[in-house]
Amino acid sequence: MTLFSIPWLELTLLLPIIGATFIGRLREPYRARQWACGLSGMALICAQLAWFVTVTPTDAPIVEPRPGSLSQFFGVEVFELDDLSAPLFPLTALIYFVTLLVTLRTKMRRFSFAAALCSLSITLATIACRNHWGIIGLLAGGMVLPYVELRARRQPVRGFVLHMGLCIGLLVLGQFFADREGHRVHSLWAMAPLLGGVLIRSGIVPVHTWLTDLFERASFGTALLFVTPLLGTYAAVRLVVPHAPDWALRSLGLVSLVTAVYASGMALVQVEARRFFCFLFLSHASLVLVGLETLSAIGLTGALCLWISVGLGLTGFGLTLRALESRYGPIRFDDFQGLYDHMPSLAVYYVLTGLACVGFPGTLGFISTELLVDGAVETYPLTGVAVVIAGALNGIAILRTYFILFTGTRHRSSIPLGSRERERYAVLLMAMLILLGGLFPQPGVASRHRVALQLLEERVRTAGDKPHGEKPHGVARAERETLVP
Amino acid sequence: MLGSLAAAEWLGRLILAAPLALVAITGLAHLWDRKLSETATARLVEAVNVFGLAASLSLLGLMLWSGNTHVTVDLGNWVNIEHFHFHFKLIFDRLSIPFVVLTFALCGTIGAFCERYLHREAGFHRFFMMYALFVLGMILTASAGTIETLFAGWEFVGLSSAFLVAFYHERPSPVRNGLHVWAVYRISDAALLIAAVALHHLTGEGDFDQLLSVHSWPDGEVAQKVTEQQALLVGLLLWLAASGKSALIPFSGWLPRAMEGPTPSSAVFYGALSVHLGAFLLMRFSPLLALSPLLSGIVICSGLATAIFAAMVGRVQTDIKCALIYASLTQVGLIIAEIGMGWDYIPLVHVIGHACLRTLQFLRAPSVLLDSSALENAVGRTLVKTGGGWSTRLPLSWQHRLYAYALDRGGWDAWLNRLLVAPVLIFFRTCDGWERRWTNWLNGLATRPAASHTHHISPPGETP
């Protein structure tokens, strides 16, 4: 048995779900956290190995179905990693691991570790799934857990259910028509519902209010885990981008651009930390979608790099906010808090992760933003300007909240408020990844560039099946610039 | 000749390595929450500045000796994919070498001064962390061989400046001013980024050597692909970036706010180095200005208007730091006008002389009363107040109007707030209220009021 013959992917998916059944029976939350951390840590290691196995070329003959894989049971390859999903897989596992790791005692009774492990399994399965119906089903499955938590907390769920129900309904409808049309550029009947579903899941304006609602009513950890893996964007890449006609992509790009600027402006005026984080997230997630729409190799590469940067940066940023919230309860930005003296390291992480999100030099986001702006300008010059404006507003919003939280006065406390070891290590890990990714970006960018070219190739293949010989948006350029030797 | 070229390249690398090491050491210490002792920090800062200064002076000497006025240090492609490369390159020419030497000399002086000035201050390590970032930003900006590298350095300077203005962060006023500075810098950064991308697309290069021809500064010419209109468009963006960084009107409001920081940082950053970065940017792109007479005209007018405005406002300031900073702004305005006129060496010499003089004046500012008394004791009589001049010949009503205008610092902040900031904030707050009503209606809840926005700290530009 070699490293390559072990079904790491399946192990990553099964470990958390098996662990969740065990942890669900534990009555002691402290032990539940320990087990959850251990299991998510193991899932992270398996996910890393699955990534390694996927991207490492091997001389060993390819055996299908892979021994121990789920394809042996189903007859078809249900879950498999490709160049797009390979780094997203460990990234998602990492997001869950650090979130579970920094859950403090004050939050333990409100946060379900078993549900978080179930959610980890479902989210990882979504990312590893390439089958369209599978993705839609898993997206629906992932929505159940926040719903259950909202119900358990006796919070109103109507808004969440309406949006998520509409999202899944539209995705099912769109996929139904898409299946009938086969592998070619989809018609309005298939694309409009698919696009609608993706836009709702991504929280694009004006169907974004479920997101602010979720952040306000669910636990911060659950909301964070539900949004930071960017499953809406993943659905867009798998379900929409390869088969989308021009108008669909232009619409996606336009509404995403509006959302990016709107959300950055909204982040600037928020007085509640969770709403602020939600809009900040929304702005960055929309920027990724803007990059996907450019359909230039550079813009797509920028979007895919930004995806990883946003995942890491916003998770780290959210965790520092969550760490503050565990000490104070809901945080508001209507008065200076002056916490710097009590938690200098958290203050540093807050700035670092926040700046990583807005593409500050030396962080992973810098090259991503450069690529994105470059690609956007190449397609539509004004898009590039809007992306830069959104980034500038986000930068102001982040420093504004930093100053409010950590400075302006001297906070007096009779109890120590400093960061705990596990918090420090978790955020330090994120910070190191952000900095190392920023200082040595070439391997990551090259890998994302490969994926961008594959996406463009897929669109070229789809265009070949299109009746009347018209070529959709981006294909002509792709052929000219990247695919034709 | 080849040996001197290799030596020059190595010296160029060392010039960058020195501040980089300082950032790495102080930054990692901050990240690990392990602080160096004050003595260790001071020695490290001294060593880095002496090392950097020695390397830059050696490079200058080598360039003079070999007659090579354009040393290129190619650090390779940071990112290289099919149609995009982020070239990391430094150039040392007649423009960048004086700036590099000036940076190390002034920052070294300030570093040594701060060891005592900030002794046992709670934010000692925080100051030197930001100081390190500032030095790195200045060196990167000054020696950048590509516009992307220049942008990275530009951002480092901006961030460190904002944090240094807010250095005394247990009081709300420095923090508000730090945020204001950051907001102006972000506008400036956005303009520079758009200019960088536009240049990339117009010429296919972000490389100064390709963009402004292979001739060394100031003999460079813009690549032939760029038309006059394109030069005007990119030039306007660069001028906007420079206006933000050098506090030209209408952005001049941040400069007196920056005086909230510790005096040494005010001296070296806003009085001497940071405030001249806008001028440096315009000097670096002077061939672009030469291509468009309209752009040159705009730059001259902007510089002269700033100089007149600052001279007027500076006369009514009641504290020494603000008086000095407006004197500084007057000179910056003149430097910008000189650049607009197409002069090369005059603005460069003006920058160097002005930066050194202003650093000295700022460092002596806390002792100004003592110095004045010493001077009076030495001459044996009270010093005669000078001034009045042409302003006394104006009608009294005009004198009063000008006085009120100067006292209000031209009202630029209020004007920007009323025209730009307030409408944006009102719009988003209204949207926020609507969103809250919508989600409540959707969830079947009674409408709760939108969150109160009469909060203590307001977004930049808004009157708290």
Image (cartoon, rainbow, N blue to C red):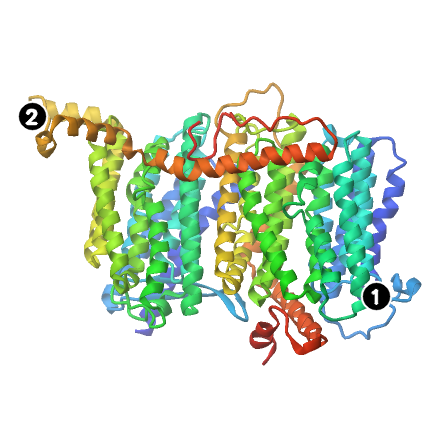
In the depicted view, which residue is nearer to us: B449 or B335? B449
Q: Is residue A398 above or below residue B4?
A: above
Q: CA distance from mark 1 to mark 2?
A: 92 Å
Q: Residue drawn at (57%, 50%), measured in percent from left and top?
A: A258
- Same chain? Circles 1 and 2: no
Q: Residue drawn at (53%, 63%), measured in percent from left and top?
A: A375
Q: Which residue is mark 1?
A: A5
Residue A483 visible within the image: yes
Q: Is residue B18 left or right of residue B334?
A: right
> Which residue is at the far top?
A414
Q: Which residue is mark 2?
A: B379
Task: Give the quadrant of residue B345.
Answer: bottom left
Give the residue type at disc 2.
Val
Q: Residue A453 in the image: x percent, y percent?
A: 63, 69
Give the residue type at disc 1.
Ser
Q: Is residue A98 above or below residue B434?
A: below
